[in-house]
Image (cartoon, rainbow, N blue to C red):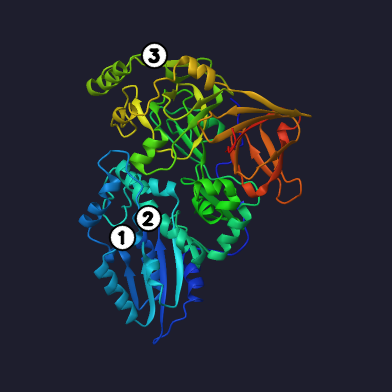
């Protein structure tokens, strides 16, 4: 296992002024607060779910407002909010339904009217803080500040029981309950409002590091987004342990050796990851989904944006079972099922690309020939209900796995990575929709059984995907495409049912690439370093290291990749994914 100079905190050099610390932030805001004893001015601090709003209120009190309103005081009562959101939250332990609610729906009409009236009668500085604060700017001289939050930081705060969901006090709820409500309700409502406000925001506030708040102007951040889509960039990865986690990422990605394991790395999931912008040595963190919202066509390409809207459809992440255990045996829903039950427009088709594997590595994929579906479901239910053993090998195929193998997993296919695999998972984005069928009788890190969804899984399993089907259509469908001086290109998938195409390039010299009007997502799967360059010099050379995932916006068009540094004169390889429009 080779060491890597994997960059865990990639940042994008940016121009503009950054204000660091509450004193500097408030001093900057003061220069724009045009109010007097007979003139009203509203400072609206719109907040994403998960923000420490009390910190903001404490900090902004030093501006000496004549009136300060916290929007929690104008929310509907908790019982009303729980009733309103129940259809989307559901009683299911994991799954809900994508809400159509807006932030306005969380506010009490009478309390909202009273607050607006009190503002109308106020003179001097009025500060409104919280979700929905922007609703008070319509008829006033105002400044709009947006306090955004990274999804990963929100999740860490949930685990520490430091925050609640929108409109309710539930910080003591389990992480899974809070996350589900946020995923299906809170983040959808907040994002709906954020999209409307984005071009109107005067300042963006980063309080992900509670003790080191930072602020940039709206124009500065929007300019940074404009620049980002002109060249390659990386998202900020995050790593998480799991009951089956392994040891590979600890070494290759230089992670905390005292953590028992690391199971996941999300390194290109824009809805979850962040972007770091570097302003003269100080970084400003913003959710990477903001780039998708603001620059969808330039980032995704017009055909992709036309098909998926403001959603980034490709996901790269790591699954590490090296020295760990098997993943849960699972299946992903069909497109029709995910539409009917969860309000999603497409499903999680995926694949396993093997970055590394030990000699005994295996992948579970598809079903044995001529099995009886009813018997298998009965045995799965018995294993779950009676804590009995499920004979996986009686029903599911085991295929040996080695480095650089590629296993394709269209929806409806039973699968899981076995132990001693290092998987680069390339998939469509709706990653939460996994139906676990069997989890090897183990507990989660919280000491509780992990959720099993046999009742859902049985409805989406494709029982025709047997050993012959998998061997013929799903395993190492490697097809030579082209070759030149010092390089060759191969198609490695995905399956014809999946909208993602993957290409692997082996190279000792320069390789010409084009985005062909689709966002490209790549990973350096062989070699220490490579450099991405523009044939016309339209962006600065961009260096990537082994196992790093990077994004090439559709707007870039033509680009080249070649070995760099310690890899010069050696063979490197990338795997590239893009949206396929023709078979």
Q: Residue 85 vs residue 3: left or right?
A: left
The answer, for residue 536, to whether it is visible in the render is yes
* Nearer to me, 443 or 297: 297
Mark 1 or mark 3: whose residue is earlier in sequence: 1
Residue drawn at (40%, 67%) of the image: 134
What percent of the width, then of the height, locates residue 118? 30, 78
Q: Which residue is mark 1?
A: 105
Q: Is residue 487 visible?
A: no
Q: Which residue, given by chain and number where applicable, does mark 2 sit on? A: 189
Looking at the image, the residue that sits furthest to the left is: 79
Q: Nearer the viewer, mark 1 or mark 3?
A: 1
Image quadrant containing the N terminus: top right
CA distance for labels 1 and 3:
51 Å
Residue ID for mark 3:
393
Left or right of 564? Residue 336 is left
The image quarter containing residue 120 is bottom left
Question: Would you say the residues marked 2 and 1 are in contact, meaning their CB atoms lie under 8 Å apart?
Answer: yes
Compared to residue 453, the image places residue 98 above or below, namely: below
Dot 3 or dot 2, earlier in sequence: 2
Q: CA distance from mark 3 to mark 2?
A: 44 Å
User: In what element is the residue under mark 3?
Assistant: helix
Sequence-earlier tag: 2 or 1: 1
- At 29% from the left edge and 16% from the top edge, which residue is drawn? 375
Q: Where 224 falls versus 381 (above or below)?
A: below
* Mark 1, other Cα within 10 Å: few <14 / some 14–19 / many ≥20: some
């Amino acid at each position: 296992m080779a060491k890597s100079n994997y960059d865990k905190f990639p940042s994008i050099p940016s121009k503009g002024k950054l204000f660091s610390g509450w004193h500097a932030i408030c001093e900057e805001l003061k220069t724009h607060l045009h109010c007097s004893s007979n003139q009203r001015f509203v400072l609206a601090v719109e907040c994403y779910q998960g923000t420490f709003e009390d910190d903001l209120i404490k900090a902004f009190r030093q501006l000496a407002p004549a009136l300060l309103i916290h929007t929690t005081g104008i929310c509907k009562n908790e019982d009303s909010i729980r009733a309103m959101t129940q259809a989307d939250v559901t009683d299911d332990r994991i799954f809900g339904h994508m809400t159509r609610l807006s932030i306005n729906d969380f506010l009490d009409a009478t309390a909202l009217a009273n607050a607006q009236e009190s503002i109308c009668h106020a003179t001097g500085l009025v500060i409104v803080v919280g979700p929905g604060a922007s609703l008070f700017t319509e008829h006033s001289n105002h400044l709009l500040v947006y306090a955004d939050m990274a999804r990963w930081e929100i999740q860490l705060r949930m685990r520490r029981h430091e925050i609640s969901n929108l409109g309710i006090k539930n910080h003591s709820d389990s992480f899974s309950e809070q996350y589900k409500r946020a995923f299906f309700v809170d983040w959808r409502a907040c994002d709906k409002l954020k999209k409307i406000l984005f071009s109107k925001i005067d300042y963006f506030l980063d309080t992900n590091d509670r003790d080191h708040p930072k602020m940039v102007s709206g124009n500065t951040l929007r300019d940074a987004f404009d620049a980002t889509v002109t060249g390659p960039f990386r998202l900020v990865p995050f790593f998480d342990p799991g009951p089956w986690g392994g040891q590979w990422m600890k070494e290759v990605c230089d992670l905390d050796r005292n953590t028992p394991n690391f199971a996941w790395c999300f390194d290109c999931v824009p809805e979850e990851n962040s972007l770091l912008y570097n302003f003269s040595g100080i970084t400003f963190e913003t959710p990477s989904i903001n780039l998708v919202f603001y620059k969808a066509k330039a980032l995704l390409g017009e055909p992709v944006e036309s098909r998926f809207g403001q959603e980034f459809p490709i996901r790269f992440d790591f699954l590490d079972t090296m020295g760990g255990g098997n993943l849960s045996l699972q299946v992903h829903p069909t497109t029709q099922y995910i539409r009917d039950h969860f309000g999603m427009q497409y499903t999680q088709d995926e694949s396993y690309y093997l970055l590394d594997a030990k000699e005994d590595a295996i992948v579970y994929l598809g079903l044995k020939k001529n099995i009886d579906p009813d018997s298998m479901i009965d045995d799965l239910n018995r294993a779950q209900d009676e804590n009995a053993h499920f004979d996986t090998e009686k029903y599911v195929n085991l295929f040996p796995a080695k480095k650089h193998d590629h296993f394709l997993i269209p929806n409806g296919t039973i699968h899981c990575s076995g132990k001693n695999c290092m998987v680069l998972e390339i998939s469509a984005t709706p990653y939460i929709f996994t139906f676990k069928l069997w989890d090897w009788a183990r507990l989660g890190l919280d000491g509780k059984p992990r959720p099993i969804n046999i009742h859902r899984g049985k409805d989406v399993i494709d029982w025709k995907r047997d050993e012959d089907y998998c061997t013929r259509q799903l395993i190492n469908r490697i097809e030579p495409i082209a070759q030149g001086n010092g390089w060759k290109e191969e198609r490695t998938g995905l399956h014809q049912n999946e909208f993602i195409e993957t290409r692997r390039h082996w190279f000792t010299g320069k390789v010409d690439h084009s985005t062909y009007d689709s966002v490209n997502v790549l990973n350096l799967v062989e070699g220490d370093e490579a450099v991405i360059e523009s044939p016309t010099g339209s962006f600065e050379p961009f260096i990537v290291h082994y196992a790093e995932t990077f994004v090439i916006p559709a707007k870039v068009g033509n680009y080249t990749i070649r070995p760099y540094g310690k890899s010069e004169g050696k063979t490197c390889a990338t795997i590239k994914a893009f949206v396929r429009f023709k078979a």
